[in-house]
Amino acid sequence: MKPFQNYNELAQKLYEGCIISDPWIDGKERFSLDPVILSSSRYNSFCDAAERVGALYDEFSQIIWNHPNFLDDYFTLTPYQKLMWLSSNGDWHGIARLDLFVLEDGSIQICEMNSDTPSGEAEAVLFNKLFEDYYPSLRNPNKGFDEKFCSMILGLFQSAVCELNKPSIGIVYPTEMPEDLSMITLYEKWFSGISSEITLGSPYNLRLLKNHELALFDTKIDILFRHYKTDWWGERLNVWTDEEDLPDTDPLDYQLRIILDAALTGNVTVINPFGSVLTQNKLSLAFFWENMELFSAESVKTIKEFIPETYRLITRLGKNNDKNDWVLKSDYGCEGDEVILGPLTKDEIWLESLEKAIPEHWILQKYFDAKKNKEGATPNYGVYLMAGKASGIFTRLSQGGTDYHAITAATFIDN
C-alpha cells in the first residue's frame, strides 16, 4: 500500500510540517507519490563520482589561484567578481550540489555543480522524512543531513577563528523572493542548536561596527551564511546582444566591502566563501577540457569519465555546431535559465541563439541522452557535498527540457 493515497493527502502532510508551503507551482504538483529506490552500489557510485568532481574543482581552484592571468584572459571576470575571488584565498566550498545523470550504458555524467547557493535541502530532508516510516527496510541517505551540515558550519568557523564558543549566525538571502523560504526556515531551525543568536536579513541590512566587526541589523555576527548569489553581489551583465538593459547592474559595493573588511580581519566567517564566484562559473567546465595539461592524471581521468565534452562558445565560432550535438549554457545561468537544449530546440531558434549569445559568456556542452525511468521521466540526481564529502541526495524527475519545474521524489537506498 502506498504511504499516501492521493496528492491532497501528501500536500496536507507537508502543510502540517509548517516549512514546505508550496506543494504546487503554477497549479502543477511538485512532488511524487512514489519514492526513487537506488541500489547501494548505484548510490555509492554517485557519491564517488560527486566527491571526485569536488576534488577536481578543488584542484582547479588552486590552478587559478596560482595563475591569476586566467581571471581576465579566460573567464573575463568583472572587477567585483575578481575582488570576490582574490579576497577568498582560493576558498570556495562549504556545501555544493552536483547534478548527475545515468546513461543507458550505466555510466554517469555530471553536467554542472552549484557551489554558490545550492538549493533543495528542505525538500530533500523533509520529504524523505515523510516516507521514512513506510520503508523501514530501506536506508534514508538524508538522515543526519542536519548534523553533518551544522558540523561543517562549525568546523569552518572554528578553523578560521580558533574559537569554540557558540557563534552568532546571520543568514543573508534575497528577502524579496519566496522560492527558498522553506530552506531558510529550515536553516534557522538547524542553527538553533549551534548558535548563540540567529538573525535573518538581506545584504542591505548589513553594517560595519567598530573594530572591523560585522552586524546584520544591530546584531554582531560571527558567521555570515550566504544564500545570495555571487552573481548578484557583483556587476550584472547582459549575455545576449539584443537583450534589454538590466534594471540594476551596479555591484553591492558597500555591502561587499564591509563583509570583506570583517572577513580579512578575522571577524567573520563567510559560508559559502566568495571564491565560489569562480567555481560557479560554467566556463570552468570548458576549462577542464581545454586545459587538461594543467591537471593531475587523476583529475584528467575524472574529467574524461564524468564531465561532458565542453568548450567556450568563442572557440567554436564558425564551426559546425549542429544543434543535435550540443547544449548552450551561459556562464551564470541557473535553474534551467539560459540553457538551450539543441535537440529539443527548433532550428531557427538554435541558430538565432548562437548568433545573439555574447560568446565570452557561453559554453557549448555535448548533449547526452540520459536514461529514463519506466514512466518516461528523466531522473536528475543532485548529490550534496559538504566539506568535500557526499552527504545526501535530492532527486528530481523531468518529463523533458530543463528541470526547474521537475517533480521531486523521496530517495531511499536498498541495502
Image: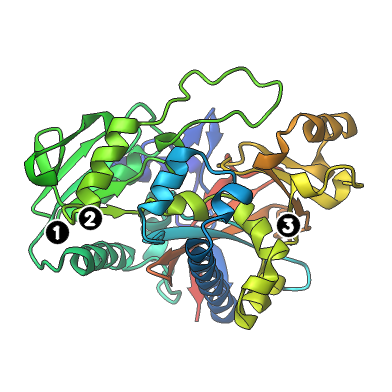
Residue at 67%, 78% (x, y): give it. 301
User: Is residue 363 toward the left or the right of residue 138 in the image?
Assistant: right
CA separation in Å, label 3 and label 1? 43 Å
CA separation in Å, label 1 and label 2? 6 Å
Nearer to me, 21 or 336: 336
Count of marks placed on residues: 3
Picture quadrant of residue 202: top left
Q: Disc 2 on helix, strand or loop?
A: helix
The dot on residue 311 is none
Residue at 41%, 61% (x, y): give it. 90
Residue at 34%, 38% (x, y): give it. 181
The dot on residue 190 is 2
Determine whether label 2 and label 3 are within 8 Å by CB. Answer: no
Q: Which residue is mark 3?
A: 310
Determine whether label 1 and label 2 are within 8 Å by CB. Answer: yes
Q: Residue furthest front?
A: 69
Q: Disc 3 on helix, strand or loop?
A: strand
